[in-house]
Amino acid sequence: MQWISGKVVENFQWSDSVFSLRVITESFDFKAGQFVRLGLNVGGEQILRAYSVASAPQESILDFVIAKVEGGLLSPLLAELKPGDEVNITQPAGGFFTLDEVPDGDDLWLLSTGTGIGPFISMLRTEQPWRRFKRIVLVQGVREAQDLTYREFVNECQQRYPGQLVYQPIVSREALPGALSGRIPDLIASNQLQEACGVHFNERSQVMLCGNPDMIQASREQLKALGLEKNTRRKPGQVTSENYW
């Protein structure tokens, strides 16, 4: 495994438990949706964890949205980094959770929980989804409203691509105007998510799931009941997913 050194330029705290680490390093190739491993030397040992890149491939600063895990070996240390501190980044980028793996369709659903929104932000920062799909539905599920990251960027996208992006937040632990409450698979099953977004799943839908493995498994089951099948290279379908732990 190869790695390069990066220098922190910003550590932005979205909330007590979620932050964005922005790092500048030498340029390298990756596709929107892929991940790298960040590492720190701790007591002479290199501790590495995988994080998806939230920035676009052409941007000079890498953006990682990270959940601070209490008792975790790395994320609490990353949360304490300050501008000028160094962090190791593995090469090359990995993963197949990219739009290149997704068949064409009319609607692109991006369903996320927690920091699983990161790869979707990277994708939306490229031209590919806007060219390929008539409509994009971004669903962001979090526990508390303060964990709704990248709201300003989402607003900018809606202004830049009027009528093409539907954004639906879901907050489970507090009431927020415009947000749904509950679990994504339950909201799919009850049709509340589709009604709130004004978009319904059909054979021309493509769905990408990223976040909590339980959410992904349960959502797959609900989508299968609606006739949407798992997408693989061998057998193209409508549902592409990536577990986030």
Image (spheres, rainbow, N blue to C red):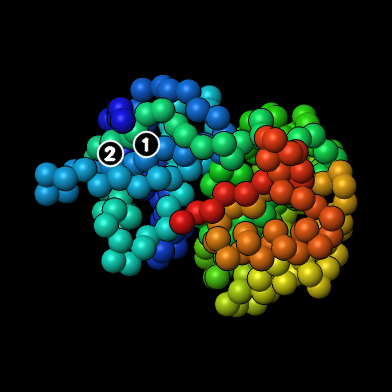
Mark 1 to mark 2 CA distance (whole Å)? 8 Å
Percent position of residue 157, x then y: 69, 41
**Within the image, what quadrant is residue 26 found in?**
top left
| Horizontal side of residue 44 vs 135, given as left or right | left
Q: Which residue: 67% across, 46% down? A: 240
| Horizontal side of residue 179 vs 17, given as left or right | right
**Residue at the spot of label 1:** 23
Q: Which residue: 72% across, 63% down? A: 221
Q: Looking at the rendered structure, which numbered label has been put on residue 87?
A: 2
Name the residue nearer the viewer: 213 or 119: 213
Q: Is residue 204 visible?
A: yes
Spot the residue most to the bottom: 174
Percent position of residue 209, x then y: 64, 52
Q: Identify the secondary structure beneath mark 1.
A: strand
Name the residue nearer the viewer: 215 or 74: 215
Q: Mark 1 is on which residue type?
A: Val
Marks 1 and 2 close (CB-CB < 8 Å): yes
Q: Residues within 10 Å of mark 1 (few under 14, many from 20)?
A: many
Spot the residue most to the front: 234
| Horizontal side of residue 228 vs 240, given as left or right | right
Q: Residues within 10 Å of mark 2 (few under 14, many from 20)?
A: some
Query: Does residue 136 lie above or below 196 as drawn?
Result: above
Q: Which residue: 65% across, 77% down? A: 175
Q: Identify the secondary structure beneath mark 2.
A: strand
Q: Is residue 83 visible?
A: no
Q: Which residue: 76% across, 43% down? A: 237
Percent position of residue 158, x then y: 74, 44
* Of callouts 1 and 2, the N-terminal one: 1
Query: Does residue 59 lie above or below 114 as drawn?
Result: above
Q: Mark 2 is on which residue type?
A: Val
| Horizontal side of residue 82 vs 64, given as left or right | left
Percent position of residue 121, x then y: 59, 43
